[in-house]
């Protein structure tokens, strides 16, 4: 049971105090006791219970109902009954000399017992928990306790210029529903609230993380007053005659980040204003802790809701193919027109869809990347809206974004269990450069933000070997009906050369690729299977690329606890790239170590020479760079060798994926491919949230 501040009793005057139900009232009866006192007795009225505790055992003994008096005696009083009137409960302390029968002095305490508590949804049921325990703590897990706040980052008023968390106005029911309720209850004689002041307050460090609104009883220009938030750390609550409770509406202003772990503490205090002091003493303080809900990414295994694509002058066929695929998957199809994309088709790089969730509400949130190219206005202008949030980490004017800040470099795995630890929301995957280029990794602002969400512990992969440097260039996840519920797809030069060697042995060595497309761009010509498998220069380069992929494979197997059976190798070749549309002029390749260093390691030395200046791009459209809409896959058409009337690369991918119940739809995205991207880069998907609640996990 919580203990109030101690009340010092006096033998010279009657003391009055307020007692909060549910707490112990500490009584100091020693400070003003007559010096000759050896024993004391206590009488009570109004249902008060008094307890005396000596530590250590007293040396003096007293007769009858008297107790020995010394400095170590601890006196506490409690009651279960609220006062009907001011000072209707009394404690009388009588002081006695040794063997004295009559008291030498008396101290009288008048007590007014009131109810006061600050409540929130600490049980995470969607409704406020009344008089809950451990409100000042926040714990993870299925049996955890603690209230949750949403960052109010949507824009319920479509005419507003900013997100709702960027203003201090609450005018609509829709905006109210985004907020968590916090209820202050105070019951007692009306006169008590004329002498004592109810105050709600937060720390200076927390005031820029939250906003609090309080309804106005009297007619006002605004029905809700902004009472706590930036620049406002304390609010004297207006308590009207007969009022029993006040409902506060709380919004989060910031997501967790490197300088904010996500916890915010609110205090409700009862202050004694009778003395007119500048610093009013607190009679009692109740505390509630909230955690701001994180931003959560959604993996390919979750149900798709909406598909986004950009329309430009020459991609009508591509847009139509993606529309048909979205329709088959039952998804809403959203086209960003040319006047809004300004010829920037890489909508995957511009934004990442996720969501935020509290027990009372869930809504999607788009994370706008700091790349700030032609598409930069689209997420804020067209995605942000009612019940659709927006968040961005803006680089300083001195900093500039790199390729790694595009969100094709940001993926998330399906749920996994790793060495006994559960990741029920999956793990974020980020592409990074090698240690020698560590200053050129994804911007620290974005990395700090992702790590600070806590619930999807990020993994950094090595993408230095790729020209663009994004993880979606060599991996993807697809749903599966067995095992872990998914498969990891990895681009594989090894699998591609094996397939082409088999076709050569079958007598198809003279069949050329690509077929069905103009391959003149990029200084490349259509080549026969025999030419490709006999090209030692190309083989050596792809051995290097395979080594880089295997390096990442080892990390993924360790960090996601995957077995060989959880991974499918998708045939793919890469070719070297030096500058703008220049091929590597000579076959000078780094040697990949036969046995990479054992895992785990903090900063693995990647399989690359410090002197190499080239990087890899896909030799033909990159088939793992696909769009996944449940069982419907939109795969870049590889234009591979046509054997017996069908592309042998497409046939192989179907053989690998269709047994999982997946539908392989090969889409011509060649105009994207020659600009260093494929279908995944050119599309974006919003998905349904996890059914699992993030607060039930244990990070």
Image: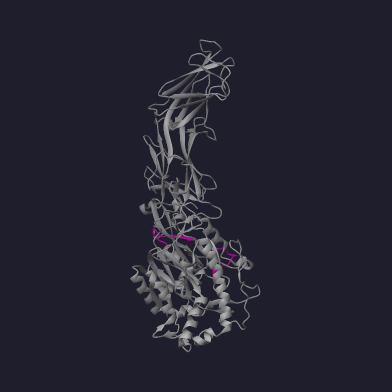
Total count of labels: 0
Report the front residue among 136 and 173. Answer: 136
Chosen colour scheme: one colour
Percent of width and height locating residue 213: 43, 47
Q: Is residue 634 shown left or right of residue 421?
A: left
Percent of width and height locating residue 611: 66, 75
Q: Which residue is drawn at 37% across and 54% down?
A: 174
Q: Vertically, is 444 above or below 188?
A: below
- Is residue 582 at least partly visible in the picture? no
Is residue 623 in the magenta section? no
Quadrant of residue 117 within the rendered picture: top left
Percent of width and height locating residue 462: 57, 68
Percent of width and height locating residue 633: 40, 72
Report the front residue among 577 and 90. Answer: 577
- Is residue 184 at least partly visible in the picture? yes
Helix, strand or loop: magenta stretch = loop
Q: Which residue is drawn at 37% across and 76% down?
A: 321
Quadrant of residue 215 within the rendered picture: top left
View extreme (front): residue = 505
View extreme (right): residue = 611
Q: Vertically, is 107 above or below 657?
A: above
Query: What range is drawn magenta here?
Result: 384-404
View extreme (bottom): residue = 510
Q: Which residue is drawn at 36% across and 45% down?
A: 219
């Amino acid at each position: 049971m919580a203990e109030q501040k101690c009340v010092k009793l006096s033998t010279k005057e009657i003391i009055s105090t307020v007692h909060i139900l549910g707490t112990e009232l500490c009584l100091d009866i020693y400070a003003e006791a007559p010096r000759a006192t050896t024993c004391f007795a206590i009488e009570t009225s109004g249902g008060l219970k008094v307890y005396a505790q000596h530590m250590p055992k007293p040396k003096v003994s007293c007769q009858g109902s008297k107790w020995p008096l010394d400095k170590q005696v601890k006196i506490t009083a409690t009651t279960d009954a609220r006062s009907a009137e001011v000072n209707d409960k009394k404690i009388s302390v009588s002081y006695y000399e040794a063997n004295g029968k009559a008291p030498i002095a008396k101290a009288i305490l008048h007590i007014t017992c009131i109810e006061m508590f600050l409540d929130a949804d600490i049980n995470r049921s969607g409704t406020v928990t009344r008089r809950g325990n451990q409100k000042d703590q926040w714990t993870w897990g299925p049996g955890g306790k603690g209230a949750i706040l949403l960052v109010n980052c949507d824009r319920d008023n479509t005419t507003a210029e900013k997100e709702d968390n960027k203003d201090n106005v609450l005018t609509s029911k829709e905006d109210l529903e985004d907020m968590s309720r916090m209820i202050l209850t105070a019951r007692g004689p009306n006169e008590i609230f004329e002498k004592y002041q109810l105050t709600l307050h937060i720390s200076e460090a927390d005031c820029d993380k939250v906003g609090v609104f309080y309804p106005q009883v009297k007619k006002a220009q605004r029905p809700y007053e902004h009472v706590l938030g930036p620049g406002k750390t304390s609010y004297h609550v207006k308590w009207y005659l007969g009022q029993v409770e006040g409902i506060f509406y709380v919004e989060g202003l910031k997501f967790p980040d490197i300088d904010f772990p996500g916890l915010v503490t609110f205090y409700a205090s009862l202050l004694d204003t009778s003395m007119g002091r500048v610093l009013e003493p607190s009679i009692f303080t109740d505390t509630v802790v909230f955690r701001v809900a994180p931003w959560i990414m959604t993996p390919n295994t979750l149900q798709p809701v909406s598909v986004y694509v950009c329309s430009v002058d020459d991609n009508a066929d591509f847009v139509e193919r993606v529309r048909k695929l979205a329709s088959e998957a039952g998804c809403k199809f959203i086209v960003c027109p040319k006047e809004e994309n300004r010829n920037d088709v890489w909508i995957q790089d511009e934004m990442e869809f996720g969501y935020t969730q509290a027990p009372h509400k869930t809504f999607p949130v788009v994370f706008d990347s700091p790349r700030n190219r032609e598409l930069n206005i689209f997420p804020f202008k067209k995605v942000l809206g009612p019940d659709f949030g927006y968040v961005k980490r803006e680089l300083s004017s001195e900093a500039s974004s790199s390729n790694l800040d595009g969100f094709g470099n940001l993926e998330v795995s399906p749920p996994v269990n790793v060495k006994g630890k559960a990741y029920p929301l999956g793990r974020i995957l980020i592409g990074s450069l090698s240690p020698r280029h560590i200053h050129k990794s994804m911007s620290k602002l974005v990395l700090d933000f992702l790590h600070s969400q806590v619930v999807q512990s990020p993994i950094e992969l090595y993408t230095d070997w790729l020209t663009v440097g994004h993880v979606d260039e060599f991996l993807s996840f697809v749903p599966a009906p067995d095992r872990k519920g998914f498969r990891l797809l990895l681009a594989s030069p090894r699998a591609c050369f094996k397939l082409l060697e088999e076709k050569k042995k079958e007598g198809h060595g003279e069949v050329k690729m690509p077929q069905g497309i103009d391959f003149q761009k990029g200084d490349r010509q259509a080549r026969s299977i025999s030419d490709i498998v006999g090209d030692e220069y190309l083989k050596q380069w792809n051995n290097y690329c395979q080594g880089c992929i295997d390096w990442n494979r080892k990390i993924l197997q360790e960090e996601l606890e995957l077995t060989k059976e959880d991974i499918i190798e998708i045939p793919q070749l890469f070719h070297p790239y030096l500058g703008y549309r220049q091929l590597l002029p000579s076959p000078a390749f780094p040697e990949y170590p036969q046995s990479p260093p054992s895992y785990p390691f903090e900063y693995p030395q990647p399989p690359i020479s410090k002197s190499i200046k080239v990087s890899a791009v896909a030799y033909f459209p990159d088939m793992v760079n696909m769009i996944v809409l449940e069982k419907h896959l939109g795969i870049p058409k590889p234009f591979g060798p046509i054997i017996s009337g069908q592309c042998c690369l497409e046939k192989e991918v179907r053989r690998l994926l269709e047994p999982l119940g997946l539908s392989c739809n090969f889409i011509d995205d060649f105009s994207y491919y020659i600009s260093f991207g494929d279908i995944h880069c050119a599309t974006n998907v919003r998905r349904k949230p996890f059914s699992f609640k993030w607060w039930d996990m244990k990070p």
